[in-house]
Amino acid sequence: MRKRGITLIVLFFLALLWGASLLIGDSSNQKPKLKEEAIKWIEDHQSLLTNLSDQVWGYAELGLKEYKSSKLLADALEEAGFQVERGVAGMPTAFVATYGEGEPVIGLLAEYDALPGLSQKVSSTKEPLEEGAPGHGCGHNLLGVGCVGAALAVKEALAAQPFSGTIKLFGCPAEETLIGKVYMVKYGIFDGLSAALTWHPGSSTKVSNGSSLAMNSFWVEFRGKTAHGAGDPWNGRSALDAVELMDYGVNLMREHMELTSRIHYVITDGGEAPNVVPDYARVWYYVREANREKVEELYQRVLNIAQGAALATDTTYQVNLITGVYNTLVNDTGVQIMHKNLELVGAPLFSSEETAFAREIQKGVGKPEVGLAEEIEPIKEPPKLAGGGSSDVADVSWITPTVSLNVATTPKECPWHSWAVVASCGSSMGHKGMLVAAKTLAATAIDLIHDRELLKQMREEWKEKTRGFTYKSPIPEGRKSPSLPN
Ligand SMILES: [Zn+2]
């Protein structure tokens, strides 16, 4: 009797320990099974996910106008039991969907905006669905739904066991204009995250370990006086002259910039008729550099040139900073964790019909007809100079450790932001890449929820790299919601 009593007490304490271990997350032995279940959930729900991505592809809504796309994704998550908060960070098409309780809190960054003028059918030659309408030339229809698929699959794994952990899907609008996440960071939407995960469609399959450039996007508007171009030009002061002079000044400055600097501009307004001296002109600039400090420095030099141009042409000028982003802070630990999961899932395998379609597209854009990437690229030493582009995922990477992957959805060497990307991201090639991304993201999230040691290592690297750093929003103080160029 006494012996049985002791045994019962021992069993009781063992059960208590087991329960506590689940709550503090020491459940790494459950991981393989949970990952398998999450991957299977995505396989079993392929048609749900591909339907969602095709709907977003069809909506093809521009940044900050993704009303139907964001509603579709938010509704799907709400129906599955997520708590959804809509219209966050001063943007009607931004949302947060949450499932679970307690730490760790793993974020997924979904995007769904399209690009202007890229409307295209799922065909191997340039053929707009609707002339001049937007199209998904960056594959964000797949990006958004891939993250939703991962969130739903992780939810299943969380629901099956009494683990502590939260999955949050962030509906991030207007990535193409580098606006959405910058405002979301400004509003503290990503605060409290343990880590963030995302992906991007591409022409290869790999975990990203390269940085991106910090950037400022801004207009300079010049105002002068109209007059007859021949009759009384002495009464006129040309705003277009000021723009031309500013651009000339900036182009001279190029000789004296660092190799990491990138500056480009378009003149959005330059007058209406040659015989009317333009009293209004506007130029839209991107200034990019390796980090925020260098962007601020270069930006100031460009503004000095604008001031000089206004003075020289007897015009006035006004600067409107539209947005700015940071460079990406790479988390090498996170890269390794995600790479292992990508290997577990495997690269997308394309059918002979898909390969033939890819080759036709390549022919259509004048590239070698080599088909699609079907291997996972190994993790290589990142280039010394960051790639030419910028992303607002970068701003999240300074708030919480962030890792991202690319999955092949598009034929090799296809020009990005083109009709060819729209066509492939609306086809079964794109769907296949998206499902690989969803599985990899889900498996990585399960790693971070169920293996606190991995998460700790990832966070320690991030803490080390951000020591002494305070995030300062590139957006001017007091601005509550974005202004978009028209
Ligand atoms: Zn993109």
Image (spheres, grey):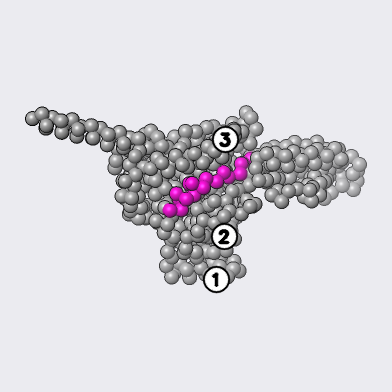
Residues under numbered marks 2 and 3 in contact, where contact means CB atoms less than 8 Å apart: no
Quarter-of-image position of residue 222: top right
Residue 301 showing in the rendered view: yes
Residue at point 45%, 57% (across, down) = 433
Q: Position of residue 164 (x, y in %)?
A: 35, 36
Q: Earlier in the sequence, mark 2 or mark 3?
A: 2
In this rendering, position of residue 95 left or right of residue 416: left
Q: How many marks?
A: 3
**Disc 1 marks which residue?**
369
Does the CB distance between marks 3 and 1 fall below 8 Å?
no
Decide: is 388 above or below 80: below
Q: Nearer the viewer, residue 110 or 35?
A: 35
Circle 2 residue: 419
Looking at the picture, tell me which residue is in the foreground, 80 or 131: 80
Q: Is mark 3 within 8 Å of ligand 1?
A: no
Marks 2 and 1, how far apart in space?
Answer: 17 Å
* Disc 2: CA contacts within 10 A as few (<14), some (14-19) or many (>=20): many
Amino acid marked by disc 1: Glu
Image quarter of the C terminus: top right
Q: Earlier in the sequence, mark 2 or mark 1?
A: 1
Is ligand 1 less than 8 Å from the beta carbon at label 2? no
Q: How would you rate the neighbour count of disc 1 (Cα within 10 Å): few for under 14, some for 14-19, many for 20 or more?
A: some
CA gap, disc 2 and disc 3: 43 Å
* The magenta stretch spans residue 46: no
Q: Which residue is mark 3?
A: 467
Amino acid under label 2? Trp
Boundaries of the magenta span: 324-340
Give the structural element (helix, strand or loop) at label 1: loop
Question: Residue at point 35% right, 35% down?
Answer: 24
- The answer to which of 384 and 81 lies nearer the viewer is 384
